Amino acid sequence: MLKIPLQADKALKMLNAAGYEAYIVGGIVRNSLMGLDRSDIDITTSATPRQTAQVFSDYHVIETGLSHGTVTVHIDHTPLEITTYRTESTYSDNRHPDNVIFTASLQEDCARRDFTMNSVCYNPSTGLVDYYGGRQDIQNKIIRCVGDANIRFSEDALRILRAVRFAAVLGFEIEEKTKQAIFANAHLLKNISAERIYVELQKLLCGKNVKKILLEYTEVLAVFMPEIMALKGFEQHNYHHIYDVLEHTAVAVENTPPVPQLRLAALLHDFGKPATFTMDENGVGHFYGHGNVSEEIAKKILRRLKASNDDYHLISRLVKYHDTFIEPNEKSVRRRLNRHGEEFIRLLLLLKRADNAGQNTQDFDRTQEYNTLEQLINTVVEQQQCFSLKQLAVNGSDLVALGIPPSKEMGTILNTLLEKVINGEIPNEKPALTDEINRIRQQNNVL
């Protein structure tokens, strides 16, 4: 007997009491069988949408998609998607069914689902209902389409990316016929909206099996990110590296914390290497300026995928600065914190660590350098050393009190003071800063 959320159990009992069949289905059953955290609650039922709404008339009901048989019911502040048993007609756009036909058959409803692992149904009184061997595939860690994989993917091409994403996240293998159909139908991803692809890509990149998937399904990702193909097999000819650019990238992604923006930055950080490759007279490869070129490529890809503005700016900045050397001393760290802020610098350091993991760490390991940098960042922050105007011991009001009105000159003076404090030329103390202000004003008057 599966342990299911109380809200789901309540909904099933209410539908059954009203004379309808009802089962939880999809991710919630799959995850329960795997002992994972529950996913969204999806319920399939013989009740029509109108009948479902009537059963839950005392609850908040949203007519999510009546034409597709779905209503959302809120029980104890938890949304449950309840969908009528249905079959589907053709998919002209490779994404949405042209028509939905309600059916009284649970098996017909399960036959339209994407993968066997998502077609298993459960009701506490009935137990598991598994028409297509989904439970066995879950136990064997196999992703297999329900029925003909080519048909499933032509119906909804997003299933192609979902299969690859599930393989990355769950660590499952994709069954051979399903895998063949993925490559045969990958071009259909061109018909899927960029927004949906971006969501799936982020989930895929945060999967525990991401390295294997990036290397095995490169051509699938290339449908919406063709720039990735230039990385495959591109040897670096440099003693710092033991992988080609794509393999290095996959290792870097795998070693980045599973935060979507960080993993996207790791994915894109070296896309500019093929275009900047040069080889010196000793046969050593170099990629001068590849950070800037990678940034420009990353921006194009992120715009193409319609990433949010926040993602666009953060990821492209991380890509741009991933190879920038930060001297391991407090002065240099203060300057970087002033320029980029603490949050960005800490993210950048995580990316640098991942980049290092994808290199020849036996002969060229920068782990200790990055440990020192992290310690310096912690010291500067914990000691509240000054690296921003808001930390400066004087402000605009102090300058006004000294007879300097709000003006461009005020901003220039404050920034000059901050730079001197960051450089260690003067202490961040009001008397010393006041003396420096007077000195600056005197110098300006003489000029």
Image (cartoon, rainbow, N blue to C red):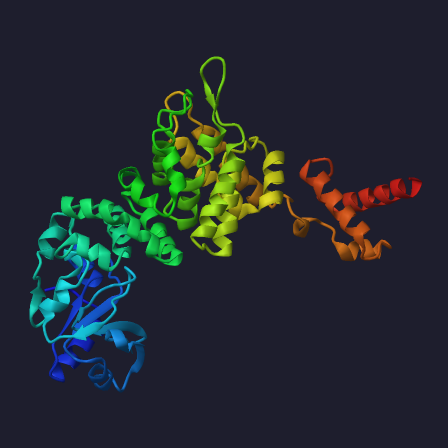
Q: How many marks?
A: 0
Q: Quadrant of the N terminus?
A: bottom left
Query: What is the x, y in percent for residue 143?
Result: 17, 50
Look at 27% across and 46% down and name the residue there.
168
Out of 315 and 305, give the one closest to the viewer: 305
Closer to the camera, 88 or 11? 88
Residue 36 at least partly seen: no
Would you say residue 281 is visible in this rendering? yes
Is residue 361 found left or right of 328 in the rendered image? left
Describe residue 247's horizontal placement relative to residue 139 as left or right: right
Residue 27 position, x and y percent, is 22, 60
Query: Based on the displayed image, in which of its 4 quarters is residue 351 positioned?
Result: top left
Q: Residue furthest top?
A: 282
Instruction: From this view, report whether residue 313 is shown above or below residue 215.
Output: below
Q: Residue furthest right?
A: 446
Name the image quarter holding the C terminus.
top right
Q: x and y percent of residue 328 in the render?
A: 55, 31
Question: Which residue is more in the foreground, 245 or 342?
Answer: 245
> Considering depth in this image, is 314 or 411 the residue closer to the camera?
314
> How far across and down, in percent of the image, does residue 410 sit?
79, 51
